[in-house]
Structure formats: structure tokens, C-alpha cells
């Protein structure tokens, strides 16, 4: 991984966090740039053709930071699909930058695994959230502010979905196994519909 950082954050610490989080996944040739945004609190971009990820960090963010995510299970009635917004509490700017990087990195894995890259925002959020919760003790809260149960957001075999992105040797050595509460099976097609007050940035196919 080629890493550059033009923010005031410690470059060695950031790079170590990135590399540790994606250990076992291919990142040779990937170029990652962390920089300050022009005004947004944060943003990220993954360029597939040039194998680059940009992470943009706001200068005036306040921490702990409440990051609204698309990780909750989708719900439906006869006419609509919707998704509750879960907040991920991030203690500092390092954790926010790591989340954005991991979100974009999973987009990259989806592409390298030759999956459809559309409507994968929820999966990318879950991939990043899992690392922040397991390694840094970040807390996930539902829309009422209460801690969300693990099975309310961590219910997919994310590693298995992009297993084809691993090098051949790694794939033979690591067989994805669905953990407790995770669902492995065919995806179901669905239409993207809106519902007032909730986030549906991706359609039910990405549940």
C-alpha cells in the first residue's frame, strides 16, 4: 500500500491502523491519500481504474463523533422499504478516517470480487463498523439513542461475499464461515423506494 497523509494526524499511526484492519486482504498497488476536505465533515472516494482511495477529513469536526450509518436491517410493508439510521460513536478523528477508508476499501473488494458494485453502501458501512466495534470499542446506537444489539446490524457474511477478491493462496487457506446471527444465501432483487424520515441509500438487494 502506498500511503500519503497531508493532515495533522500522525501518519505512522494512521498507516498502521489501515494495514492492521485489512490484513489478509489484497492491497498491493493500492494508493491511499488522507487529506483535509474543503468543507464537508468527511468524504471518501474509491477509483477502481487507478486503484486509489481518497479520504477527506473535516477540520472542524467535534468528537466524540456521531456517524449515521446504513447498517440496520431494512424493513418493509406492502408499499415501502426503509432503513432505520444507526449511529456509530467514534472517539476521535483517527477512528473517523479509518471508517471512511474501510468503507471505500470494501467497495474495492466488491469490484475485485467481480460483484455488482451498485447499491453496496450498507455492506460497506457494516464492514467498517465491524472493525471499529471489535478493535476500538465503538458503540452502535439505534435511532432512539439506545445501544443496538449486534444481530440488528451484523447479520451478513461480508468476508464470504468478497472472498473471490483474495489471492488464490489466501482463499485456499481461509474458508469463510458464517458466525452467529449471520445469513448466507442468495440475494433478492428489490426496488429502491423512499420513506420519509429514514435512509434508503441502497435498495433491499443489499440487505
Image: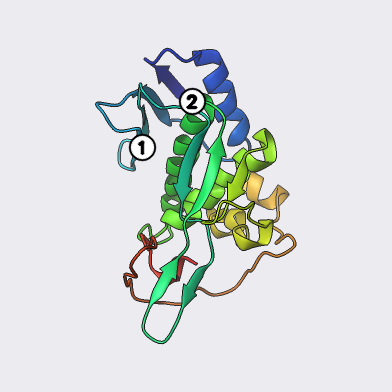
Q: Is residue 28 visible?
A: no
> Would you say 96 lies left or right of 80 here?
right
Percent x, y for residue 15? 53, 21
Tag 1, which secondary structure?
strand
Mark 1 or 2, which is nearer the eye? 2
> Would you say 148 lies left or right of 90 here?
right
Task: Tell me the distance, in whole angstroms, between the alpha carbons under discs 1 and 2.
Answer: 14 Å
**Residue labelled with disc 2:** 93
Tag 2, which secondary structure?
helix
Nearer-N-terminus badge (1/2) = 1
Question: Quick one: which residue is furthest to the front in this view?
Answer: 144
**Residue labelled with disc 1:** 44
Q: Residues within 10 Å of mark 2 (few under 14, many from 20)?
A: some
Q: Residue at x 63, y 69 (%)?
A: 184
Q: Residues within 10 Å of mark 1 (few under 14, many from 20)?
A: many
Q: Is residue 204 visible?
A: yes
Q: Quadrant of residue 118?
A: bottom left
Q: Residue at x 72, y 59 (%)?
A: 177
Nearest the viewer among 33 and 151 is 151
Q: Which mark is residue 83?
A: none
Q: Quadrant of residue 175?
A: bottom right
Residue 29, placed above or below residue 79: above
Nearest the viewer among 19 and 102 is 102
Mark 1 and 2 residues: CB-CB less than 8 Å, in contact? Answer: no
Count of residue discs: 2
Q: Residue at x 48, y 32 (%)?
A: 96
Percent x, y for residue 60? 36, 23
Residue 113, placed above or below residue 95: below
Q: Residue at x 51, y 56 (%)?
A: 143
> Would you say 96 lies left or right of 195 here?
right
Percent x, y for residue 23? 62, 35
Percent x, y for residue 120? 42, 57
Amino acid at each position: 500500500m502506498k500511503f500519503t497523509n497531508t493532515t495533522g494526524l500522525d501518519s505512522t499511526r494512521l498507516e498502521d491502523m489501515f494495514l492492521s484492519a485489512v490484513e489478509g486482504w489484497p492491497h498491493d498497488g493500492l494508493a491511499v491519500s488522507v487529506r483535509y476536505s474543503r468543507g464537508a465533515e468527511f468524504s471518501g472516494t474509491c477509483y477502481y481504474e487507478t486503484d486509489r482511495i481518497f479520504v477527506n477529513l473535516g477540520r472542524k469536526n467535534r468528537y466524540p463523533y456521531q456517524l449515521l450509518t446504513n447498517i440496520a436491517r431494512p424493513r418493509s410493508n406492502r408499499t415501502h422499504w426503509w432503513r432505520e439510521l444507526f449511529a456509530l460513536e467514534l472517539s476521535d478523528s483517527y477512528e473517523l478516517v479509518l471508517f471512511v477508508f474501510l468503507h471505500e476499501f470494501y467497495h474495492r473488494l466488491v469490484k475485485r470480487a467481480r460483484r455488482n458494485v451498485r447499491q453496496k453502501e450498507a455492506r460497506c458501512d457494516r464492514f467498517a463498523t465491524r472493525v471499529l466495534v471489535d478493535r476500538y470499542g465503538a458503540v452502535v446506537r439505534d435511532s432512539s439513542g439506545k445501544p443496538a444489539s449486534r444481530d440488528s446490524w451484523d447479520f451478513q457474511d461480508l468476508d464470504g461475499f468478497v472472498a473471490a477478491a483474495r489471492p488464490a493462496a489466501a482463499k485456499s487457506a481461509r474458508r469463510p464461515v458464517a458466525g452467529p446471527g449471520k445469513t448466507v444465501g442468495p440475494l433478492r432483487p428489490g426496488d429502491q423506494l423512499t420513506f420519509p424520515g429514514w435512509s434508503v441509500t441502497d435498495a433491499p438487494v443489499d440487505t
